Amino acid sequence: MLQKAWNYKNENQGTVEEIQLILWDFGISIFTIQENREISEVQSYLFSSPWNFEEGKQIFEQTGLFSHAKMVKKIWMTSPKHLIIPESLYDEGYANQWIRRFHFLNSEESLFSINLHPELNAYIIFPIPERWQLLLKDSFKNVQFESITKLALKQKNEKSEGKIKCHIINLPKMTTISLIEIQQFVSHHVLAYEDSQELMYKIALLLQEKEIAQNLVHIHLEGIAPFWNDLLQKLEEFFPLNVKTSNNTTLSLDFINRLIQCE
């Protein structure tokens, strides 16, 4: 039985104009967008194992994605095993050799690359199972592939109440952490996680490495079901948190709307 992570349905249903997806190694979130650009419905699922292909196909079939493939306009992706390569150094063949030098890839994996322009003149590259890549590209012919990192990069141009911002995008079992200091992108990490205490430890190590004092950091949290586990509670214990303690629905819809507006 498929495990649902978080779901939402708009009471004011209208004609669906577009579908977008968020896909990561442990899950998928599907959101339908109405003609007035309001979110119609969100369905979020977790896989029982990383990149579970059979469960992914089952979700696509049950939610009608295959039959409405032409409506799927964007697929947002992320992976912990990623590299950001400057556009001037990017060559597809060489990039394959480069990432294989840094990460072990098995025979079933192939590399996926997404251009981060205009936010950054670079590519983000990460491995996914070959049959997932074939399924996505064969099923959704006109789709635009994007990276969650592109949304994180936009944060550097947005005002913060503090000089140093730790921007966290949380998906169940996956999180991105970006450090931004006076509108300069300091670092970006994509991490798999189950335990919030362990995640706090990783953030503390990152701040120590960059010689940033904990009490100077302003936290911004968003994502799909961003209160997954006890993440908000742990953040409040470790940092002077300045984020709206809204419910999951409000924060999740705000996040999806930001994705929709991200060109």
Image (cartoon, rainbow, N blue to C red):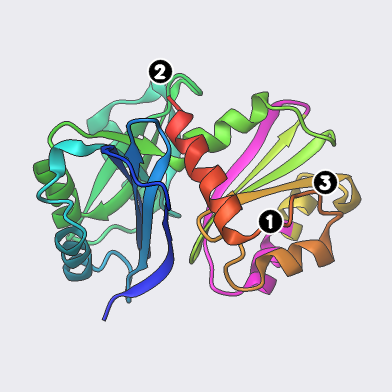
Dot 2 and dot 1 residues touching (CB under 8 Å): no
- Residue 233 seen in the figure: yes
**Quadrant assignment for the C terminus:** top left
- Which amino acid type is marked by label 1? Ser
Q: Give SS at disc 3.
A: strand
Q: Which residue is label 2 attached to?
A: 88
Real-space CA distance between mark 3 and mark 2, rounded to the nearest whole angstrom: 33 Å
Q: Residue at x 48, y 33 (%)?
A: 150
Task: Tell me, for residue 261, which label it has, or none.
Answer: none
Q: Position of residue 220 (x, y in %)?
A: 70, 46
Q: Which residue is label 1 attached to?
A: 246
**In the rendered image of this protein, does residue 12 appear above or below residue 143?**
below
Q: Position of residue 76 (x, y in %)?
A: 37, 42
Task: Tell me, for residue 217, which label it has, or none.
Answer: 3
Nearer the camera: disc 1 or disc 3:
1
- Residue 140 seen in the figure: no
Pointer 2: residues within 10 angstroms few (<14), some, or many (20+)?
few
The range drawn in magenta is 182-203
Pointer 3: residues within 10 angstroms few (<14), some, or many (20+)?
many
- Which amino acid type is marked by label 2? Ser
> Residue 142 sits in which quadrant?
top left
Q: Give SS at disc 1.
A: loop
**In the rendered image of this protein, does residue 138 appear above or below residue 248?**
above
Q: Is residue 193 magenta?
A: yes
